[in-house]
């Protein structure tokens, strides 16, 4: 007796529904995709109890005639593809012909549709996969589909649904994603008596972004074109806040997807700019020839496979890197006169303003000579150890032989040249350009410069190191010692030589050339703290970035340290050559800007 049987069609449809339909939001996604493929210019979604009681999607697309309406409920009936070759280059959102029969098999299903130009429409009612009625009706052009009591015949599946609010949130997210991807289509969403969204059709994505999120100056535009490959959209700017998480909407040929390659590229781009862990907000549109991406790899069509995976990864990574590298500098706004606190009479305070263009005047206010390795952690001299270059050539009080002008290898538009006027409290550089006044944190700016130089050198080898004639014994906790010893190879690349001396002690035998002996010990302790919090499963690159950031921080010129005009000018020139001049690797802002317009407005010149 045969033990293998053909499954009844209704059971087969319910099994297929388990793959395609997970929740009400899945139903909304499939129906909106059909509406877009049908040429809709207006789509309205209505739900009750988060979609568990009712989902209705109405569109003004081309609709269907009676025969096509009936065929659309048969499994694998579709107008999108006709032969196997069509799967190699899919241009529509739907193509399998599974969604409608799968949805109809687990709900009370009502479809009303009228072909554009026809006098009458068709209504089909289906209960749990069984057609209950087919009749001619009067209905607007387009299609309206109602899904009642989803999973009513699969109580086990219905139990896994979330609360009404939770399911409504998922539906809202799906509608928002499609609205972002198709700004030329009007979208609206109603939940019970409440209208949650109403976004009329607009001309471009930027207008739809404003409709949904309002003014978002914290989002940076992305735009990159390669051969047969384009990327555009918006990504979150780097900020000084801690780990950040935001919505990530990624579209491939206008299909919303979740792809590990793209997700990794996003993280990689931000990791190169800042060591802070983040899952930033992004809205990216990737256009790629249809024959170079396979969308037929997942039942819900949420995943894709790229023919040139590494090419896509690098393209996305560099597009985002370019965008965040050009991040806007925070702007200051002057307070109205009435709201300002009284300012005491000006006094000559040493250190308030120093090192400016007029040495004869500003030297008496606290300007001093060259930065040495001591007191400033190597400061400007640290750049010499890294082989960094200055656009101005030799600088006074530094070894001229270590500075050779080289063209920048970055293809990112640099900051405009800034002319330093002096220091505020020997901590902030005050500079000007044609756009206004900039206030630069000298330590943070130098830290960004050193970090990029360190990372640049590490990509080709290791940092220069100097052996200590008298090794330094450093006492550390057990966790700190283990963290450092487990990354001894990474430390060696940075120029640190460490070995276990026994007990609670490590022996420091070599230090990076850009750090002095004492600063190297302080940096080593900071490195131990950084590495203690690093998950064991993290990539070596993450550890190196943390090590490089900490090393750069301790080597950078400190606050409360006077700089000559030449040193300030050099820091600003080197900052212009960096890829990410707006933030340090720890996420702190490098500069604040008081724009020319703000100044003129407060002097009543505009």
Image (cartoon, helix red, strand yellow):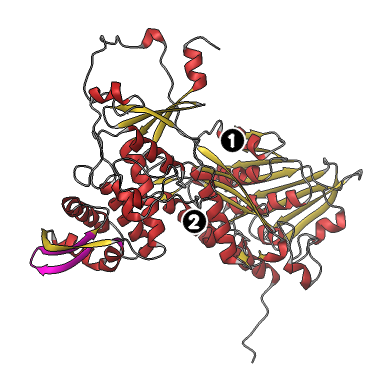
Q: Report whether residue 154 is seen.
A: no
User: In the figure, 307 relative to 380: above or below?
Assistant: below
Q: SS for tag 2?
A: helix
Are there few (<14), some (14-19), or many (20+) residues within 10 Å of tag 1?
Answer: some
List x then y, in percent, for residue 438.
42, 29
Q: Position of residue 83 (x, y in %)?
A: 80, 71
The kind of secondary structure the magenta stretch mainly shows is: strand
Quarter-of-image position of residue 532: bottom left
Q: Farthest residue in the bottom direction?
A: 1
Q: Is 120 placed left or right of 560 in the picture?
A: right
- Work out whether residue 311 or residue 55 is closer to the camera in this orientation and state it: 311
Marker disc for residue 146 = none
Instruction: Residue 48: name its quadrant.
Output: top right
Number of the front mark, 1 or 2: 1
- Residue pictured at 22% horizontal, 57% vertical: 528
Q: What x and y, as percent, mark residue 289?
A: 71, 60
**Crowd around label 2: few <14 · some 14–19 · many ≥20 (10 Å):** few
Q: Quadrant of the C terminus?
A: top right
Q: In terms of depth relative to the viewer, which is nearer, 91 or 415?
A: 415
Say whether residue 498 is magenta: yes
Q: How many marks?
A: 2
Are the residues at dot 1 and dot 2 in contact (C-beta closer than 8 Å)? Answer: no
Q: Is residue 274 visible?
A: yes
* Coordinates of residue 74 in the picture (x, y in percent): 76, 64
Label disc, if present, on residue 159 of the rendered structure: 2
Residue at (65% x, 46% y) in the render = 181
Tell me the magenta residue range: 494-511
| Residue 14 is inside the magenta segment | no
Toward the left, the furthest residue is 503
Q: Nearer the viewer, residue 262 or 170?
A: 262
Residue named by callout 1 = 212
């Amino acid at each position: 007796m045969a033990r293998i049987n053909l499954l009844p069609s209704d059971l087969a449809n319910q099994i297929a529904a388990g793959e395609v339909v997970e929740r009400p939001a899945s139903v909304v996604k499939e129906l909106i995709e059909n509406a877009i493929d049908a040429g809709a210019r207006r789509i309205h979604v209505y739900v009750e109890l988060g979609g568990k009681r009712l989902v209705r999607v109405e569109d003004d697309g081309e609709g269907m005639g009676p025969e096509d309406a009936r065929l659309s409920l048969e499994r694998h009936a579709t107008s999108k593809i006709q032969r196997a070759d069509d799967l190699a280059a899919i241009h529509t959102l739907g193509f399998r012909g599974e969604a409608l029969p799968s949805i109809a098999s687990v709900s009370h299903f009502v479809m009303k549709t009228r072909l554009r130009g026809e006098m009458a429409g068709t209504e089909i009612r289906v209960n749990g996969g069984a057609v209950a009625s087919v009749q001619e009706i009067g209905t607007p052009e387009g299609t309206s589909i109602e899904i009642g009591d989803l999973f009513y015949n699969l109580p086990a599946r219905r139990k896994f649904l979330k609360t009404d609010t939770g399911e409504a949130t998922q539906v809202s997210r799906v509608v928002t994603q499609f609205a972002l991807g198709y700004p030329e289509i009007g979208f609206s969403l109603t939940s019970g008596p409440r209208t949650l969204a109403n976004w009329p059709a607009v001309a471009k994505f930027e207008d739809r972004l404003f409709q949904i999120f309002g003014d978002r100056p914290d989002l940076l535009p992305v735009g990159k074109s390669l051969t047969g490959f384009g990327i555009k959209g918006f990504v979150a700017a780097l900020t000084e806040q801690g780990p950040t998480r935001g919505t990530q909407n990624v579209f491939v040929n206008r299909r919303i997807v979740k792809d590990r390659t793209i997700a990794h590229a996003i993280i990689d781009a931000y990791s190169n700019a800042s060591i802070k862990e983040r899952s930033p907000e992004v809205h990216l549109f990737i256009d790629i020839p249809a024959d170079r991406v396979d969308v037929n790899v997942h039942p819900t069509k949420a995943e894709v496979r790229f023919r040139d995976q590494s090419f896509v990864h690098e393209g996305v990574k560099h597009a985002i890197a370019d965008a965040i590298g050009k991040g806007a500098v925070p702007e200051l706004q002057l307070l109205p006169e009435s709201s300002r606190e009284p300012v005491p009479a000006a006094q000559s305070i040493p250190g308030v303003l120093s090192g400016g263009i007029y040495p004869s005047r500003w030297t008496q206010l606290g300007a001093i000579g060259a930065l040495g390795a001591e007191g400033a952690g190597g400061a400007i001299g640290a750049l010499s150890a890294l082989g960094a270059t200055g656009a101005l050539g030799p600088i006074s009080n530094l070894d001229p032989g270590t500075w050779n002008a080289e063209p920048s290898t970055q293809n990112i538009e640099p900051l405009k040249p800034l002319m330093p006027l002096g220091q505020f409290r020997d901590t902030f550089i005050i500079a000007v350009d044609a756009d206004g006044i900039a206030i630069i944190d000298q330590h943070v700016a130098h830290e960004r410069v050193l970090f990029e130089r360190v990372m640049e050198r590490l990509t080709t080898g290791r940092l220069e190191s100097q052996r200590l004639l008298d090794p330094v014994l450093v006492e550390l906790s057990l966790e700190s010692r283990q963290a450092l010893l487990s990354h001894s190879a990474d430390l060696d690349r940075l120029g640190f030589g460490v070995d276990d001396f026994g007990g609670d002690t490590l022996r420091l035998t070599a230090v990076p050339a850009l750090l002095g002996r004492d600063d190297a010990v302080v940096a080593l302790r900071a490195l131990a703290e950084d590495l203690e919090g690093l998950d064991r499963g993290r990539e070596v690159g993450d550890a190196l970035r943390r090590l490089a950031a900490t090393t750069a921080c301790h080597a950078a010129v400190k606050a409360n340290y006077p700089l000559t005009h030449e040193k300030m000018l050099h820091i600003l020139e080197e900052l212009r050559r960096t890829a990410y001049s707006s933030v340090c690797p720890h996420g702190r802002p490098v500069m604040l800007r008081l724009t020319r317009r703000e100044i003129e407005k407060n002097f009543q010149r505009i």
